[in-house]
Amino acid sequence: MKTGAHSIANHTHDLSAPSAGFGEPQEISDPEVLVAPEVARLLRMNVKTVYELARAGDLPCWRLGRHFRFSRRAIVAHLGQCKAAPYREGK
């Protein structure tokens, strides 16, 4: 490592500490707006599947340029409208 180079540790923030400044990261226990990895954890599926469903229009989301954002309420409501597939032996 070069002398005077900054390590990533110098640029991390304590997400559990309250923040007074705008744009400072804060811990949010149950955010309303989610990113794809958070949706994947919520739905217990692969993040690639979340992106595929979002691109196909099968999962409610917003596109902000190349980025997807998801509403927790819309995802939960969407799940309530889904019909369970019948169980098939051997599948």
Image (cartoon, grey):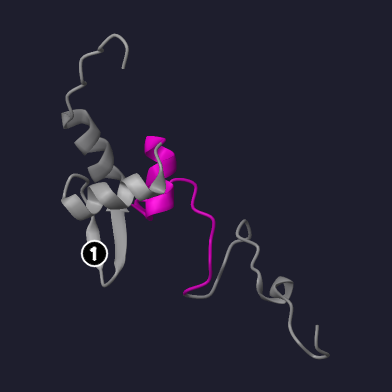
The residue at 53%/75% (across/down) is 21
From what the image shows, is residue 68 above or below residue 2? above
Identify the amino acid type marked 1.
Answer: Arg
From what the image shows, is residue 80 above or below residue 34? above
Neighbourhood count class around disc 1 (C-alpha, 10 Å): few under 14, some 14–19, many 20 upward: few
Tell me the SS state at disc 1.
Answer: strand
Please indicate, yes or no, whether residue 88 appears anywhere in the rendered image. yes
Please indicate, yes or no, whether residue 31 appears anywhere in the rendered image. no
Which of these two is toward me, 47 or 26? 47
- Percent of width and height locating residue 17: 63, 60
Where is the N terminus found, in terms of image quarters?
A: bottom right
Determine whether, in the image, residue 5 is placed left or right of residue 72.
Answer: right
Where is the C terminus found, in terms of image quarters?
A: top left
**Which residue sits furthest right?**
3
**Which residue sits furthest top?**
89
The residue at 21%/55% (across/down) is 55
The residue at 20%/37% (across/down) is 78
Check disc 1 and report the residue beneath it. Answer: 63
The residue at 55%/71% (across/down) is 20
Q: Is residue 83 magenta?
A: no
Q: Which residues are magenta?
A: 23-44
